[in-house]
Image: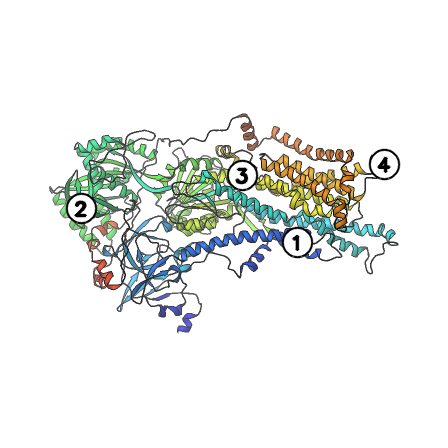
Amino acid sequence: SLFMMSLPVQEEERYIHANNRPLNLPYQYADNAIRTSKYNVFSFLPLNLFEQFQRLANAYFLVLLILQLIPEISSLSWFTTVVPLLLVLTMTAVKDASDDINRHRSDKQVNNRRVDVLIDGELRSEKWMNVQVGDVIKLENNQFVTADLLLLTSSEPLNLVYIETAELDGTFILKCVFPTGEVRCEPPNNRLDKFKGTLTVNGQTYALDNDKVLLRGCTLRNTEWCFGLVVFGGPDTKLMQSSGKTVFKRTSIDGLMNVLVLCIFGFLAVMCSILAVGNAIWEVREGSVFIAFLPRPNGVNAGFSAFLTFWSYVIILNTVVPISLYVSVEIIRLGNSFYIDWDRKMYYPKSDTPAQARTTTLNEELGQIKYIFSDKTGTLTQNIMTFNKCSINGKSYGRSIGEKTQTVDFTWNELADPKFVFHDPSLVELVREGDLAAQHFFRLLALCHTVMPEEKTEGELYYQAQSPDEGALVTAARNFGFVFRSRTPESIRIMEMGQEVTYDLLAVLDFNNVRKRMSVIVRSPKGKLILFCKGADTIVYERLHPSCLKLKDTTTSHLNEYAGDGLRTLALAYKDLDDDYMEDWRRRHHEANIAMDGKEERLDELYEEIEKDLMLLGATAVEDKLQDGVPQTIEQLAKADIKIWVLTGDKQETAENIGYACNMLREDMTEVFIVAANTAEGVREELEQVTMCPDAPDKPVVVEARAGLFWRQKTRKVEDEAVNGEYALVINGHSLAYALEKDLELELLRTACMCQTVICCRVTPLQKAQVVELVKHYKQAVTLAIGDGANDVSMIKAAHIGVGISGQEGMQAVLSSDYSFAQFRYLQRLLLVHGRWSYLRMCKFLRYFFYKNFTFTFVHFWYAFFCGFSAQTVYDEWFITLYNLVYTALPVLGMSLFDQDVNDRWSSQHPQLYSPGQLNLYFSKKAFVRCMMHSCYSSLILFFIPWAAMYDTVRDDGKDIVDYQSFALLAQTCLLIAVTIQLSLDTHYWTAVNQFFVWGSLSAYFAITFTMYSNGMFLIFTSTFPFIGTARNSLNQPNVWLTILLTSILCALPVVAYRFTLIQLWPTINDKVRHKVRKEALPAPAPRRPPVRRISTRRSGYAFSHAQGYGELVTSGRFLLRRPQKIRTALLFPQSDSPLSQGQPQLYRPITALNRVPEEEQPAQQS
């Protein structure tokens, strides 16, 4: 059986022996090491060369090199191909090796982290990579979770642990546990929210679910220590399984270049065929005359001569696919990547985090983005809640937007949180003067919650809040004199204006997504029964006493104001209860609680019954702090016609609220559609009922086409439809699951793409990736995904461009990203400045590169008709070798690295400049054809003008000037000057470097030419440098320079005239902005505008990230059980625990209450 277990079969169930490595070894479970690198020392060379020769051009030049080694057809020396090919392969290999070394370093850093493992009864420090499935490990406060663990015990009461799952879903969770034994569980999978298994201890079997598991990617918080059993390690962990497959990303220009190279091959074959046929005809008609003194070799006739000529011209005309193109592309991409790394305006000093281009191959794609998919928590927001405003008894308190007021001094309150800030001193005065409404307001906030307090030393309070909203509200009450100190299942102890008061806790009416409110029923020390309720204003208003009508209207106007400011609101109310009624209600509540059938329905009825005729106290407004500059960034990106979709694991209300705060959702929108059905049919109906254009067809219009290499790839594109008005779509995760099915996905895409804003709530990491893939597949648009947690990794990998924000949620997103920085606002500069410049430069480079090389090659083609199709070159062989490597390499690199149509400020202030990249206007198949036609015209001028000017021409001294060598020199000089002038016309932004490269390259040409054509070089290398004296004999003649001038003018004149006409009659957005730049001074930096208050027509700004189930936990006695944990640990394991880290900043994160250990399992747990 052990042999069978060791076979690498598909795992259906995992069987684990706790703390017993020998018994787990035969199963061959994956170890805990992770590997994201592609190569090792031995595989690098073969694998990298294999990848490089998959590039069509590299393979082509390898074939070309083989052809050049055949003497019968080689018309050029072998070094003209070997030198550039080796240069390309070496540079690419060095870059790939550098990228992979960084991946190895990252893997090594993670794998070499240390953790305490229980081995032979004692704790030993081991590297993460050496941890195995079945090991029992000890984690301490603020440590990363090493692997997927089954939680065994912890330092907290009831073995609860606080874990920050920010890398998974941006939240904070409370989990409880079972003892250990033998575990059977599901095989590795990517479902973060599900876990199934059983635990067998002493013959008893217990069910295991997701509540008992700690996932890799989490961080242990506010828990001194815990022990866990490794269930999944390394690549089997749910985090790694959810991360998605790493794909090799290539830009759309790369794909287009492959298609164009294929077309060029076809065009080359056509040209060579024409010249081969010409050779055959010439051999038949003219060649026979030369046989007398140039006899043909045996077996060679006109047909065979044409065959050899075909391959000779393949070698000569190979410059239509220049290998230096790929070297230059890599250099340009590398240079533009450095600009991102060096950009001080994308450096975040608070965390000392610069922007980083983690890949060098995608820069120009940043200038073509059409869709952005963004996470919310930690990406758009800081995940920090602050109590900003409140309305009490019809009066609003707190600072208005843009208003400058002094901060409140809370030194009178010894228990105040020093980090709490409020800007309205009148509220403190009101509370301290004894205003009953204000005191009742903060009393409610101090009593109606499920917060767990922790007071390590007298007066040092720490609140463990299930949601950050709750933490902010309880802290506000604390600072205003109503301090929550401690709780038991039956009571809550608070300090009211310095006086300790204990309330009896009779019931907690828990929150859920349907109720949208929570209530507590307490008895005051004076015996008074009170129900305190907080919840969504729309829900609370329905349950108010008629006497509150006037107060309700006033509070509503305040709530509209708060919603307009993008704040998250709650309404507060209370009700005095009668003792007799309460006794009867509690009896019925107990009966409902123990009912076997209809428990939830009966409890809801009881809650509805008691939560009516409430008296309104007021409302709270909490700010979910956005990162700096988020609304402005989104506004600018929208002006650039980039659509932003928010994909978040948060609740719908929270996501909507942030949407309004970011100006993605606006009051003036025509309509905001909500899709929240729980069935496939319901989702279909809701999607089909969305009408944004009355004339729209019933079904999405899908256009089918072919694309890619050899046109093998079938593409389907959902066409954009005209829309009347501005719309937004909000869809829930459970509805999205149905909408992403095959029969509904096109309807979803059609509806979403007609909307200006799309927000997907409660989505899983897998759904995020599916949404990105859907848009990629059916819109044929360039996508960008941005996030900061491990739950965003699959989305980041799926998109064309992945951006990681190095924030509070760990580095998992950054490690998987293509670009990273610290703040969302830097995305604007990355796209509108760096992305646009990179795209512009790359397109200019490609257009110019193809122009200069086609012009170079076409001159060969025309010359063939004058040399008997003999495959003789029109230029000197050394000029052919150095043309792309020396004479024209640096000027075009200078333009491609430094050129900019307008500077960064103008680029940011005119986002419309970004749209040409989205439409592929600067380089496409049409642009390539225009480039070929331009080259054809230039080559005709560059060949026939010198030919006509020099034909039958004599020197000043009467000697003949039109020998082959003189004509070759004239032709190549005219060519080089003409393409340099074209480059100068293409350059918008001249720097000293550009000037140096242009004039330096021309100077180098003349210096090298005079050197190579000198007597000395001929005497030393007679066969290699045959053009002796040609330069000094030709370039001292006035008619030669006049010919050069004439060809230059004729080449440049049509370009200048065409561009002038276009600018005058059909100016582009770039032309208009550049004209504005010349007329106006440099624009001032855009001022940091304070957010403008909007007049809100929303019924509610309610958003509360609370979850159901925690009320039951706080009313049970279980969380109070405390055992002498440290003593037990010291007895069991001979190693002392590390001290609890002190002085951590108080951060509120959501905590979800999960299942408790049943009573009968307590002895087993404590054994």
Amino acid tagged 4 = Gly
In the picture, the quarter occupied by the N terminus is bottom left
Give the CA separation, mark 4 to mark 2: 116 Å
| Between 592 and 129, the one nearer to me in the picture | 129
Q: Secondary structure at mark 1?
A: helix
Q: Earlier in the sequence, mark 4 or mark 1?
A: 1
Q: Which residue is mark 1?
A: 82
Give the CA separation, mark 2 to mark 1: 83 Å
Q: Which residue is mark 3?
A: 837
Tag 3: Cα neighbours inside 10 Å, few (<14), some, or many (≥20)? Answer: many
From the viewer's perspective, tell me whether residue 933 is left or right of residue 426: right
Q: Are marks 4 and 1 in contact (CB under 8 Å)?
A: no
Label disc, if present, on residue 958 of the rendered structure? 4
Q: Earlier in the sequence, mark 4 or mark 2?
A: 2
Q: Is residue 27 above or below residue 984?
A: below
The quadrant where residue 673 appears: top left
Q: Earlier in the sequence, mark 4 or mark 3?
A: 3
Label disc, if present, on residue 492 of the rendered structure? 2
Q: Nearer the viewer, mark 4 or mark 1?
A: 4
From the viewer's perspective, tell me whether residue 266 is left or right of residue 807: right
Q: Nearer the viewer, mark 4 or mark 2?
A: 4
| Between 1017 and 845, the one nearer to me in the picture | 1017
Q: Nearer the viewer, mark 4 or mark 3?
A: 4
Q: Nearer the viewer, mark 3 or mark 2?
A: 3
